[in-house]
Image: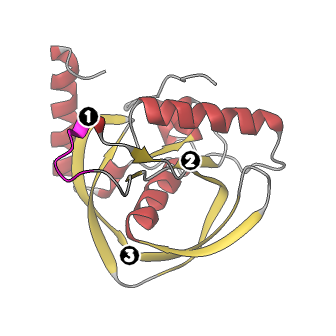
Amino acid sequence: MAILPIIETPDARLKQISTPVETVTDAHRTLIADMFETMYDAPGIGLAAIQVGVAERILVIDLQREADDTPEDADPEKIVRVKEPRVFINPEVTWESDELSVYQEGCLSVPEMYADVQRPAEIQVKWLDEQGKAHDEKLDGLLATCLQHEMDHLNGVLFIDHLSKLKRDMLLKKLEKLRRSGRAA
């Protein structure tokens, strides 16, 4: 496994529309393993293949939860995380709820920037896993939000594209200022 470089805005590759995977191969499985390694190292909870320079409809998610036996007063640096990795190849939303939810989103391609984004609260999604097996499931909560965020990447959309022009421009100026000061990648 390898940690891959993560592409950051304003790199034009992030605006590419990714192509569907025809057949899941060992090369895809290697890419998926590298994507998980990269995401965990960043650290993040989701990563689309385009964020590491591969324009294919592949994404990985791991919301990771605290271990059930973690003490309430545990040092945040020492909290044990339970990994629950999920792979989505060629994901497609087949239904979305009228009810919306708002989450404060961030992105490994827009480092250290966060904003509230409104998305459907529930979605029905079909996809393939890393073995090429088909799935169809109704998702809600953070998993639904994260999946929609990562699927946006497959269509050349960043979470900041959901913001007003004013808010987006403010975040991008703030990011540029952080980069100039050397505090952001």
Identified at 49% across, 50% down, the residue is: 62
Write the start and end of the magenta stretch as one range. Answer: 71-77
Image quadrant for the C terminus?
top left
Q: Can residue 13 be seen in this view?
A: no
Identified at 34% across, 54% down, the residue is: 69
Say which amino acid is labelled 3.
Ala
Q: Give the answer, above or below, for where 111 lies relative to 167.
A: above
Q: Disc 1 or disc 2, which is closer to the eye?
A: 1
Say which amino acid is labelled 2.
Val
Disc 3 to disc 1, how far (Cα)? 31 Å
Q: Magenta stretch: residue 92 in it?
A: no
In the visual, does 126 lie left or right of 185?
right
> Hey, which quadrant is residue 107 in on the image?
top left
Task: Point out which mark residue 77 bears.
Answer: 1
Depth check, front residue: 159 or 24: 24
Q: Disc 2 or disc 3, which is closer to the eye?
A: 2
Identified at 50% across, 75% down, the residue is: 123
Query: Mark 3 highlights which residue?
Result: 121
